[in-house]
Structure formats: structure tokens, C-alpha cells
Amino acid sequence: MKRRRTAWGHMPRGCQVVVASVLFLAFVTKPLGAQTPTGPNDKAAFLESATRALAHGNRDELETLAESLDPGMPEVVAFRARLLIDRGDYAQAEALLRPVVREAQGTAAVLELGSLLQTQGQIEEARVLLESVIVNGLRSFDPFEQYWGALAARAVGNFRQANRLFRSAAQAAPDDPAIQTSWGQLFLEKYNHPDALASFQAALALDDQWAPAHLGVAQVLASENPPVARSSVDRALEIDPGFVAAHLFVAELALDDSNRDAAGVAIAEALAINPESLEARSLLAAVAYLEDRTTAYEAEVARAHEVNPVYGEIYRIVGSRAARAYRFPEAVSLVRRALQLNPDNTRAYADLGMHLLRTGDELGAREALDRSFEDDPFDIVTYNLLQMMDQLSEFETFEQGDLVVRIHPDEAPALKEYVIETAQEALDELTVRYGMTVQAPILVEVFPRHDDFAVRTLGLPGMLGALGACFGNVVTLDSPRARPPGDFNWLSTLWHEMAHVVTLQMSNQRLPRWLSEGISTYEEKRKHVAWGRDGVLDFAVALNEGSVLSIRDLNSGFTRPETISLTYFQASILVEHLIDTHGMTAMQEILRGYGQGLETDEVLARIGLDFDSLQASFDKAVEEQFGELRLALEKPQQEIPSEGPEMLEVLRSISITDDGNFHVQSALGQAALEVGEDEEARKALERAAILVPMATGFDSPRGLLARIAQAEGDQERAMRELEMLLEYDETSIEAVRLYATLAEETGDQLRLGQAYERLIEIDPFDPISHQVLGRMALEDGRTALATRELTVALALDPVDRVAVHTDLAESLFLSRNFSQAKNQVMSALEIAPSYERAQELLLAIIESEL
């Protein structure tokens, strides 16, 4: 059923909600240099100074401000209560607030008490108080009261009213850092990262000491720029060492890096400030859960429930951390427990929908996401997922063997057979190799738009570097059409993800990322020499620069954009080293050990290793394998000129003293080629290719040597050079096309077939590849393959449809499928009635039917 939805990110900025970082932040309506208030009724001045003091971490200053004013003033009481709440003195804060609330309806004190009671699980009383603040805000023209009403509306989950009230309040103080920060936090909560970042940056432009804004920047950039995120949260803590939320964010960053010890330190610092922090207890529970310390986990849950007996959020947070560890079925169970305690937790329904999608339960996911969207239509992730599922419902579904495959109908004719064949082959081969039985069915979904793949995977567009994802029983990946031809090899990507299916299932979803990605990349390379070898040169350069990660720190490389590609490759050669040194049986034992809940040091001990011994043997193996290569890739002794008339002469001079440097020889070859010195170019490029045979790209030494040979009419030499290039290069579509052209010109059918098979790995939507392979298979008597390839070619609208219809008819005829053969030959004759080959074939079909 279609539904009309409004995406939060598509609303005009003026219509969006502003929210505070804590439940009570007031306007800063005067210049930041305003004097401390002296009059007991100077509410605005007090709110300005108190809010700034809190944002700057100056709690002593805030205490002094409060002592200088009427102790019964609701705003003063609210701030004093906030200080008590921040250090976990909930009972004292409640005792302070209740007497004031009786006489001060709709004030900040009522907001603070309602929020405190909500924290403690006294939901009904809290709602009554918060609703009164909302009503007062809706009736009031006072921007403070509108602002408090907006905060109360957000607290009870009424985002529409919060939007209305924040809009009114924001118009009164557009340059206030508290409001800009609050606005950013709501955008962040709704996954509207661009507007969130703009708001946080606007707040910092007004006051660069605003700690909550620094934390907001860190939260926005945590995924796309972890170093800046870390420096931003460090700045927040430098300003305010007592900022509990910042300490907990540091803990989350550490957990993302699988550094649970560092996370524990940050959580302990948060609890030292506020021992009753439910969020801190939730993260402690998550760490204990991930480490299978059941008693400690249950103890933290119990501690949280002492504060709030209906705090289901702890299960949602633990579930989120379990999902980040790829333990998706457990995440589903945990979030369901959260909903048992609090059936109105909209965020929990959204999380449940995401987790169910990752387990393959798309029906259950839609139900959960629909419920979440009904309660909160402003959540971008929920909106995106429902939109994606609407599109996914239009995909064609194919069930065969261990697989359920979903492909867009425009692409299914070209991709279906390849996806099913490759995915099933991977399962059959790898389950035997790893000694396991896969838990089928495995759902494979192929997306023609990259952003749809990204939403299916994480709920948001982006993930520009990702090509595929695996969740254990679910595989998602980009279609070849999602990126320009030559951008990636889609079949190697599919093989990579199917390897994840095997290892994740075998380890009960508990594999560390370095091993999971390492095995998948290693298995790519085992399947085809060119697959999984893209990082060789980058790794050798990293060795020279000393930037290769230690084995202990390898997981952290996956969280930094600048190191992730290198980390994939390093992990793969570590896996290769483990298997070469200790055998496949040891690798199986490692996977089973993780499945039993062991940590990495315990798993290594099972095969007689520890981190230090593994690091030592790995370093030795790396030097043996890459020592000569990294020497060839060292920086030249003299800087290589990039242009100028003297460039060639300088390179000639450098090459004499730096004969073993790849950069020098490659640059000399290219420079000589540009001025027509082909023989000199050939010698330099040959030297470069010997030094670094795995250099990739059409403009690599092998690619240039092939073109020199082609220009000289030496087609055999050109093809040999291209073969050596394509041994390492899985995506150079220009090289493959040239290889196909040369093979066709020389009549080399074997090479021609290899070329078109490789082209299909890169661009399966070119009908010529399928047409040629189909015709070759037909000539060899491989009618099943011929029928498949020619059927695909027809679906891709070839230029010569008559010939393809006729070839397909011939293949079907040889398979004794006379009815379909006749249909194809008639289609050919409808286009070209006088086509003799089709006429003759039709007569043969009719005679065979008699």
C-alpha cells in the first residue's frame, strides 16, 4: 500500500524543530559580555549567564549566580536542580523542585521536574507536568515559555508541537548559541546531518567555548571523519571535564574501534560524575553483554532499573551495540525486551525494523517501521527505509538452491543467472573448504542505485566506498549499473559477500572485522588471481612510510576513511599468512572459537599463538613477500619533474643513478613516449614492469607497452602485455576492450572468450559480450550456455536483433526445444522476412516437428 510521507530533510528549514542539549537551556538574548545580574527579578539576565556558565562547564559560577538571587525563583530552582541531577542526586533535586512546582505552573521548574520524573520512570505524573508546560507554551507569547513548551513537547515525543513552539521561540533569538545547539541536536536525532552540522557550527561561531556544540560536531562527523570527531569531543571535555554526555561519546568511539578497555575508562569517568546515569549503565551493560559476562550484564540492568523500573531503553542500547557487532538476531531479541517494558518507544520500533531487515524478516521489519513512522514521521532513517522497501517490493524474486535473489526488473534478465550461479558456487565451494553447513535461505538483493543499497544497509544514503554488505543471512550489493563501468568488479564483490555468509554463520556472528574482511578478501584472490589484489602497491608504500597497523590495532583501521582500503588488504595477507603457516584446520578452529564466545587472545592460544608471536612471524613474512617491492617504491633520491622542456633529460639523468626505482622508470617511459621516443620508452617501461609487475590501470607500464606494441603491429606482444596487466587488474575496462579487439583481429577464439567473460565481470549490460559468447558456445555445441548468453543479449536490446534471434533459435533447436525455437525464428523473420538463415532454420524446425 502506498503512503504519503514527509521526509524531515525535505522540510523548509524555518519549519524544523529546535531542541536543547539538556532539558533545560535558556536563551542567551544579551551580548555574551553582559554583566552578572544583580536584581532578584532580572530573570533574562540570570538565564543568559546561567546558561552560558553551564555550557562552559563553570558550575561553581552557576552556584554563585543562584545564591545571589531569590532562592524561590522558579528559574533559579530549576538550575540548582539541574546541577543536582547532573551529579545523580535525583532525590534531592526532586525535593527542591516539588514545593516550587505547586505554585509555578508552566515554568522551567515544572519542565525540570517532569523530565526528572520521566528519567525515574514515573511516566504518568511526568506526562501531566510536561503537558502543562506544553499548554502554557502554546498559549504564551513569552519566548522563554514557548521554548520550555517546545522542550517539554520533545520530551513526550510530540515533535509537531515542538516544531511549532521552537519556531516561535527561535524567531526571538536567532543568534543564540544555545538555540543553535538545540536545533542541531534535533536535526542529529532525526539523522539530518547537514543541518545539524550547520547549526553546531553556527553556535560555535557565536561562542567557541560552547561545549555541547563541540560534542554535536563530533557526533555528526563520527562516521565520515573520525579524527575531527575525536578532536571535537576532546575540545568539549577540555572546556567541560564534567560533561557526562561527552565522556559517553568517547566510550562509543572506543567501542566502534573494538577497544572495550578504553570504553570502560570513559564510562567510569562518566559514572564518577553521575553514578545514576542510565546511559552510562546502558553502555556498561552493552560491554558486559558483548563479552558474555552475563552476571555483570544483569547487574548493570538491575542498577538501571533501580533508578527507573520501566527503563526499556537499556535493552535498545545493548541491542544497538550487539547489531554493531553483527549479532543481529540477538539485537532483535533485545529490542523486543525494550518494547515489553515500554511499548511506546518509537526509537525502539525503528531499531527493531532495521535489525529485522538485517535478519531477512522484511515483513516484520515493515510492521515495526510503519509503527515507528506513525508515531514519528520526521525520522529520516525510518522514512528512507520505508521508501526503499516500497521500491524493493517491485523487484523480481528468484528462489533456487540455498538462495532467494531479488533484482530490479530492468536488470533481472542480464543479472539473474550470473547472481544465482556465482552465489551458489561460492556457498558450495566455501562451505566445504571451511567445514560448515550454511543456514539457508540466503537473501541476496542487488540495487541499481547506490543510495538504495546504502539505505538498505544503514538507513541513510552515502557509503560511497562500499560496494556490498553481508549480515549473515542477508547480502546486499550495488548492481553494476549503480556505478560507472570499470569502477568495480561486481562478481568479485558478490563472491566477497558470500564468503562473509560462511564465516559469519560459522562464528555465530562474532567474528572481529579484521578477520571477517580479511578472509573475504583472501577468498576473492583464491578464486581469481586478479580479484582482491588492488591494495598491493598501497601496502608496500605504507611499509615504507611506517604506517602499517599492528595486529592489535587492525580493527581500528576500518573506522577511518583514509586507512580502510589498506586495512582490507593487510587483513587479507594476515589471513593468508595464518593459513599458509598453520593450515586450514587452524583457521576453522579460529572461527569455531569465536563462535564459542572466545576473545582473540584466547582463540590464538588454541593454535599455539599470541599477539606478539603472530606479529613477529607476520612481520617476517611481509618482509620476505614485499621487501623488494617496497624498495622499488621508495621515494626517488631526486625529485621527479612534472613538466618542462628539460623534463626528459632530467629523467634520463636520474634513471642512471636510480635504476631500481619504479617511479623514475615509469615517469621516464611516459615522458619518452610523449615525444615519440618509443624504443627508449619501451626499455624504461619494461624495467618499471619488472620492478613492480602488479601496477594496475590502462596507463600503467604494461598498459603502455601494450599500446606501443599495437601501434607497431605486434598484436601478439600487445595481448601478452595486456594479459600480464589483467592478472592483477580486475576493473580496467579499457584494457579488456583492447584485449578483445586484438583477439578478434587475430582470430584468437580462446582469448576472445576470455576477454568477453572478463567484460561481463565489469559491465554485464553490454549485449555484444553476451552475443559473442553465445555464438562461440553455439559453435562449440554448448547449447545450454549459448541459450543463456543469447537470451541475455536479446534482453539488452542488441543492434542486430535478427542475428541474435536466429542464433537463439538455433541453440534451442539443437536442444530440441522446437516450440521456443520456432518463436525465436519467427521473431527474426518479423523484422527481416527475407533473412535466409532464419528461413532455412524455420524449415528445419518444421521438418523436425513432423
Image (cartoon, rainbow, N blue to C red):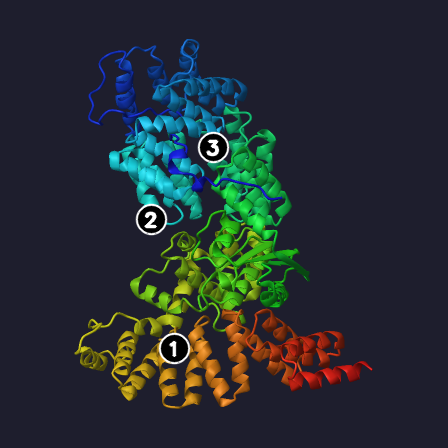
Question: Where is mark 2, residue-wise?
Answer: 227
Whole-percent x and y of residue 338? 57, 34
- The residue tagged with tag 3: helix, strand or loop? helix
Q: Are marks 2 and 1 in contact (CB under 8 Å)?
A: no
Q: Is residue 339 left or right of residue 174?
A: right
Question: Where is mark 1, residue-wise?
Answer: 693
Identify whether 378 is placed above or below 256.
above
Tell me which corner region of the image, top left, top right, bottom left or bottom right, holds residue 48: top left
Q: Is residue 370 left or right of residue 51?
A: right
Question: Where is mark 3, residue-wise?
Answer: 281
Foreground tag (2 vs 3): 2
Identify whether 609 is placed above or below 117.
below
Question: Crowding near pointer 3: few (<14 within 10 Å), some, many (20+)?
Answer: many
Q: Is residue 610 left or right of residue 587?
A: left
Q: Residue at x 42, y 41 (%)?
A: 192
Task: Give the quarter of the figure containing the N terminus.
Answer: top right
Q: Residue at x 42, y 22 (%)?
A: 149
Tag 1 or tag 2, which sits nearer the N-term?
Answer: 2
* Marks 1/3: CA–CA distance: 55 Å
Question: Crowding near pointer 1: few (<14 within 10 Å), some, many (20+)?
Answer: some
